[in-house]
Amino acid sequence: MDNKVKNKNSKALVTIIVLLIIIIIILGLYILMDKGIIKINNTTNKTKQVTTEEKKDEIENKILYLDDSKEIVYENEKKIPVVNINSKYAVAINNELSNIKIDENSTISYNYYTNKNVLSLVFKQAYDNDYKYYHIYNIDIYTGNEVNNIDLLKIKEIDESKFSDLVSNIFKEIIKDDLTIIAKADSSLKDKQQARYNLSISKENFEVTKVPMYLNKNNNLVINVDHYAMAGGEAPYQTLVNFDLKQLEN
């Protein structure tokens, strides 16, 4: 009888000891993991998360090519640029460009620039009398949507409320020679020239939602403004102003 009791007590003791050992091991592992000494599970989870994010970025940042075999902008048979992006806005750009009248008195050229997700296309039509007309477009290469002026100002971290005043001041400095011409002009021309100068520097000429703008090869903001020159016809000359460098853009 005593031996049976002793055996039962021994088994119970062994069981308790084993349980204590298991508890100690579990607590030890928990402490080590909490202190960062063991990172097996965390590392695995982190690796999976990064992989998922990379795949997500890869999908989101895929250019929506119309034709994978061509550049993002290419020339058609008429030497007119075509935006090689599969979206409604790109189609609208291409339709507008294809309908531009090209006459024998004008020459055409274009440039395009990509800055991160923004494609800027600048199409120029120049005439012998120094008149230039620009068609400017900004499109997101990943979504195919238009990048509007407010978007561009946000990219450049420019305060929208101060934009018109800032550009007006820059342009005043650029065309300051006009004031010298006005000062020396005959009285018969002075009022007309002053009126044209006032149009050039008016806030309406730099209205943030209307004035065409784009990002050039150096990611500088370039603005297409009207310059009512002292000499020439009634129509203004379209002029490109580099906002970042405060000078004319070639």
Image (cartoon, grey):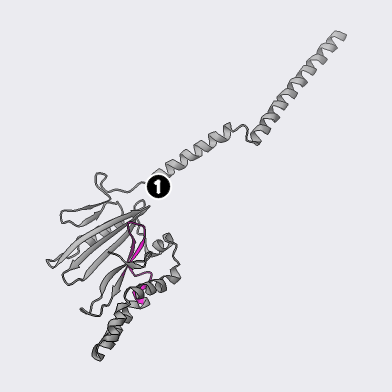
Q: Residue at 33% across / 48% down in the picture?
A: 63
Helix, strand or loop at mark 1: helix
The residue segment tinted magenta is 204-224
Up the image or down, 6 lies above or below 122; here it is: above
In what quadrant of the picture does the N terminus appear? Answer: top right
| Residue 140 x %, y % | 35, 55
Q: As rendered, which of 227 and 235 lies closer to the eye?
A: 227
Q: Residue furthest left?
A: 104
Whether residue 1 is visible: no
Q: Residue at 33% across / 73% down in the picture?
A: 174
Q: Quadrant of residue 158?
A: bottom left
In what quadrant of the picture does the C terminus appear? Answer: bottom left
Q: Residue furthest right?
A: 2
Up the image or down, 218 lies above or below 63; here it is: below
- Label 1 CA crowd tier, 10 Å (few <14, some 14–19, many 20+): few
Would you name the residue on which mark 1 appears? 60
Name the amino acid type tagged 1: Glu
Q: Residue 105 lies in magenta, yes or no?
A: no
Q: Residue at 27% across / 59% down in the picture?
A: 93
| Residue 201 x %, y % | 34, 77
| Residue 235 x %, y % | 23, 77
